[in-house]
Amino acid sequence: MNLEVDLGIKISNPFILASGILDENGYTIKKILESGAGAAVTKSIGMEERRGYEPPVVYENDPVFINAIGLSNPGIDNFGEEIKIALAAKKPVIGSVFGKTVEEFSLIARKMEQYGASAVELNLSCPHVNGYGMEIGSDPDLVNEIVSEVKSKINIPVYSKLSPNTSDIVEEAKAAEKSDALVLINTVKAMAIDIKAKKPVLSNIYGGMSGKAIKPVGIRYVYEIKRELNKKIIGVGGIENINDAVEYMMAGASAVQIGTVVYKYGKNIFNKMNNDLVNYMIDNNIDNIDELTGVALK
Amino acid sequence: MNLEVDLGIKISNPFILASGILDENGYTIKKILESGAGAAVTKSIGMEERRGYEPPVVYENDPVFINAIGLSNPGIDNFGEEIKIALAAKKPVIGSVFGKTVEEFSLIARKMEQYGASAVELNLSCPHVNGYGMEIGSDPDLVNEIVSEVKSKINIPVYSKLSPNTSDIVEEAKAAEKSDALVLINTVKAMAIDIKAKKPVLSNIYGGMSGKAIKPVGIRYVYEIKRELNKKIIGVGGIENINDAVEYMMAGASAVQIGTVVYKYGKNIFNKMNNDLVNYMIDNNIDNIDELTGVALK
Amino acid sequence: MKTSIIYENIKLNDNTNIIKFPCNEKIEPGQFIMAWVPGINEIPLSFSGLNDLKEITIKIYGKASEHIAHLKKGDTVFFRGPYGKPFENTAGKKLLIGAGTGIASLVPLIDKNAYGVLSGKTGNDIVFQDRFEKKSIVTDDGSYGKKGYAVDALKDMDISEFDMIYACGPEIMLKSVMDYMVNINDRAQFSLERPMKCGIGICDSCSINGYQVCTDGPVFSLKQLMGMSEFGSTRLNYSGKRIKI
Amino acid sequence: MKTSIIYENIKLNDNTNIIKFPCNEKIEPGQFIMAWVPGINEIPLSFSGLNDLKEITIKIYGKASEHIAHLKKGDTVFFRGPYGKPFENTAGKKLLIGAGTGIASLVPLIDKNAYGVLSGKTGNDIVFQDRFEKKSIVTDDGSYGKKGYAVDALKDMDISEFDMIYACGPEIMLKSVMDYMVNINDRAQFSLERPMKCGIGICDSCSINGYQVCTDGPVFSLKQLMGMSEFGSTRLNYSGKRIKI
Ligand SMILES: Cc1cc2nc3c(=O)[nH]c(=O)nc-3n(C[C@H](O)[C@H](O)[C@H](O)COP(=O)(O)OP(=O)(O)OC[C@H]3O[C@@H](n4cnc5c(N)ncnc54)[C@H](O)[C@@H]3O)c2cc1C
Ligand SMILES: Cc1cc2nc3c(=O)[nH]c(=O)nc-3n(C[C@H](O)[C@H](O)[C@H](O)COP(=O)(O)OP(=O)(O)OC[C@H]3O[C@@H](n4cnc5c(N)ncnc54)[C@H](O)[C@@H]3O)c2cc1C
Ligand SMILES: Cc1cc2nc3c(=O)[nH]c(=O)nc-3n(C[C@H](O)[C@H](O)[C@H](O)COP(=O)(O)O)c2cc1C
Ligand SMILES: Cc1cc2nc3c(=O)[nH]c(=O)nc-3n(C[C@H](O)[C@H](O)[C@H](O)COP(=O)(O)O)c2cc1C
Ligand code: FES
Ligand code: FES
């Protein structure tokens, strides 16, 4: 039985830690890799140290989960040590990158490569400098520029993480076509009001919804993009168990990322996923994890 | 205590049946009005009779609910009788309209007025003739034209129902600014795959997610638009109980629509909402339902 | 979707099959499932057997029913449900009236006090007659049993002696049966069929006078139906257009 | 968010208050809540009392703690939780070591077998001393009790005679206490404070060597801490930058 996935780099199983969840401190990343994750994506790292928003930064009311961390991060210059600590687990660490300009993306990606990251993931859901509330991902020309520039400057694989907060994801995906894989999806813009306090809960008011509630949105994007572009896809959004992961793979994903659910089941979710996948493959007579990718498209 | 809401027409309480839920057969609409709804929106009606998609047209797996009815409708010429039957309840019936062109919207809206509809709601989430998978709502110029034309041709209030499947809802809302109220939100594009069948569940593959899972998306849109435009808003999306309704009102809604939850709790949800609202207002010392609108913005 | 593995498929006649499958859901007589044929359609089907194995009796009309009727042992059946309000199974003398495969959903109600009235266009449409000890059979063309409609069979008997009357079949037949009922008070239950899309009371396609056949029915009492002006008169077609029945 | 109505606010000293409120949640010593001040911030606070009314002891540092410390009878407190792994409350002789308001979360553990070591910068920082029958008090400046640090107080006693040692305070103090412990095996529990944003193990801001203080802690055993190279050495600041402690 073969659980290995090829994403430009080889990953020993298809379960990857999603960006922004327990992946700021190198020791935590290391621990999650040791708990069975095939690879881990770091928190999105920008040019400078950034405090992010004040708490509350999360709103949790199952099935709803909303966060507004506000891209807090130590800045790329301070992140090398964390990657080094994490790499001790001897599994791929994928550096997530965000920037305000093409140049920033490029520079941070290069640093990630120097630090030993196995691949970079471009977080295209970060704010667009010119657009009020708009994201970089909804500007196809900019996306294309960023991806081309980064691809030309580094030798490790480049993944583009797309935003569902757009009217035309196919266009966005096409703009990112030079990437080695597309990562779908980031969080869905949302908010919650506490009716007793009569105030938005998150200090930033708006946040990104993740978890169970967005799985059908993620499945739709993975399926649609796989059908239109037949690119390699990493599925993410609301995966809580092996059935959810298989659903993403059948929709077209080659691997999946797991985020929010970690707060529910702990880091051990990765070991559990691996066990459950093996059982699923035995029960369904699947030798190679690849066989699952895109079967619902046929 | 005053539960009455002014939406260009007076509505005896803020709970309105959402379009597409139990509102195709005049007798059902009548029954729902008699079960306590302040008003009811009809199923979206187009120019010609349209069969819609084959079943499965719904996927239900709480908290996820997805539908792909496919705008099935009898055509505007066959709909007069249903409105007449519904109006026997002596409460406002709001005609939902969809079209392919400005002219279609206008013509159907005029017929709705002739049939005795108390207001019309423009369903701008219907497919755009030129755009692959795009919706009319993501074309601001077209939205503006439709709203202007319809407003100029009928004397009953015009509401515009906007789509969340867009990258810039504020622009969309501005384009619909001539409406008497904005209705936020329609369903969120989504899909589900049955992993045992290895196939998408809905016969149309893609559908619209509604219910609990989209409430935070609806709240965000209501809040954002209220803040930007200060227009009258009807909130819709995932309202299951009085707290959800109050949350929408605090975010900026003057009234709310209720759809998906009817399958969970039956038509009596409207009576229950009214009772619970009265209790809420007593407990919180609120005389006039208006006082709730937008308090979270202050 | 729920699934089960077909245990047996019994051909009843040219175009009608019984499929049997294990299923742990609690299902009561009169309830139905939405059976899914991936890539084709999803259709409502009620139960003709509720013992250790559940039984469904399917008459082939179109693609979906054909597919399900031809499922073989070991094949998977996909479904949602059970849905709907069941028959209230009462003690005492029962009269079961079924037109065509309509009798199928009444089969689970059969006991030693049951009397069956089975009707059909031709003898070919009569099924399950061997399950009844006491019965009347009528066909439109007289090819089997007496010539006539279900209601004609009732005229030959004293229906007031039954403690409960159950009927299932096309609405037009149910209407004629209902119209024949005097002095029955509320001692009758009818199972209706209207086009169904959602099965869970949200799409309005199956509605009758504000009631949803899928959730408020499919079983309605005589009293309920008497108040319904749409019964046997009009319904919405698949697109939502009001048509005569 | 959960809410409760403040029942009482007791001023302990210049910058420390106790608020009491009813709360039906099951809360154990050492657990904490994330207390929300709408429009301002949300901060972790542990419990200094767990009887019919729950008690929180707040030292004012910034806006959020100030707001909560000044809540009046009848005001609403908003919170999430309780969160975190509690102290394991064992029988036998207990040593409770608290620095400043750190002693607050140990108060629910006090019984007749408890011995308290209370430390502070100045006498003003010493609170809850009257709750202990047997105690040592030390201050950095000697303005109250003996002059010295918590660990100095330990040197005057035989800590090996205690069945369980509990400690809460700044990490640097905990580290010095831990380093002093020999022959204690695993008979010690430490409650840590690291910056917290989410409180539910998702944001990584409170982490120490792969453990989350908010979910795997705040209480860790001596054994657990001994394996942690970050303990008393480095942590991430609010933005995620590694800093020395
Ligand atoms: C609550 C409920 C319970 C049901 N239980 C059963 C059951 O136990 N066994 C069973 O065989 N059927 C049952 N039916 C009917 C069954 O759902 C339909 O026969 C089925 O939907 C036909 O689907 P299809 O795709 O095979 O045919 P379609 O392609 O939908 O139809 C093919 C042709 O047959 C006609 N047709 C379809 N259904 C019927 C019908 N019921 N009567 C007359 N003409 C029809 C259509 O109008 C069309 O012309 C039930 C229906 C309801 C509402
Ligand atoms: C698990 C846990 C339990 C806690 N329990 C309690 C408790 O029961 N009672 C209590 O009073 N506090 C407790 N704290 C500490 C409390 O959360 C902080 O004091 C609070 O976050 C300060 O918030 P603020 O907005 O008022 O101050 P901020 O505006 O965040 O801070 C103002 C200034 O004070 C400094 N500061 C903030 N907190 C501390 C601190 N703890 N020690 C030293 N300097 C600080 C900041 O660096 C800053 O310079 C606990 C912390 C944790 C992690
Ligand atoms: C607390 C939190 C922080 C996140 N931070 C980031 C981030 O920094 N960069 C990024 O690309 N995605 C970030 N995400 C999005 C996740 O990587 C993921 O795309 C999303 O949560 C959907 O997956 P899930 O439902 O499994 O969590 C964050 C999500 C959460 C919940
Ligand atoms: C089965 C179904 C059919 C719908 N049909 C329509 C429609 O015809 N026109 C329309 O504007 N919205 C339609 N909607 C969207 C609802 O009116 C509403 O905007 C959405 O479901 C969110 O509200 P809810 O969560 O309360 O259902 C439909 C929704 C459902 C569930
Ligand atoms: S089938 Fe949809 S309401 Fe009955
Ligand atoms: S506070 Fe977020 S992980 Fe502990």
Image: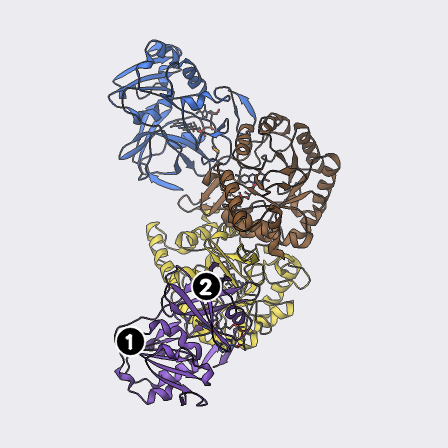
Chain colours: A brown, B yellow, C purple, D blue
Look at the numbered disc 2 and give the secondary structure of its residue: loop
Instruction: Return the mark for residue C7.
Output: 2
Looking at numbered disc 2 in the image, what kind of residue is underneath it?
Answer: Tyr
Disc 2 is attached to a residue of which chain?
C
**Up-down relation of residue B184 to residue A188 (above or below):** below
Query: In this rendering, would C140 be left or right of A102?
Result: left
Look at the numbered disc 1 and give the secondary structure of its residue: loop
| Residue B229 in view, yes or no | no
**Up-down relation of residue D85 to residue B181 (above or below):** above
User: Which residue position holds label 1?
Assistant: C112
Q: Say which label, 2 or 1, has the lower sequence index.
A: 2
Query: In this rendering, would B262 be left or right of B130?
Result: left
Residue D79 occupies which quadrant of the picture? top left
Q: Position of residue A132 (x, y in %)?
A: 62, 45
Q: Position of residue B16 (x, y in %)?
A: 45, 62
Same chain? Circles 2 and 1: yes
In front here: A252 or B285?
A252
**Up-down relation of residue B278 to residue C67 (above or below):** above
Q: Position of residue B264 (x, y in %)?
A: 41, 59
Q: Are marks 2 and 1 in contact (CB under 8 Å)?
A: no
Instruction: Return the mark for residue C191.
Output: none
Please rate how many residues cluster around mark 1, counting C-alpha atoms within 10 Å: few if below 14, some from 14 to 19, many from 20: few
Residue B140 occupies which quadrant of the picture? bottom right
Q: Position of residue A105 (x, y in %)?
A: 68, 36
Please rate how many residues cluster around mark 2, counting C-alpha atoms within 10 Å: few if below 14, some from 14 to 19, many from 20: some
Disc 1 is attached to a residue of which chain?
C
Looking at numbered disc 1 in the image, what kind of residue is underneath it?
Answer: Lys
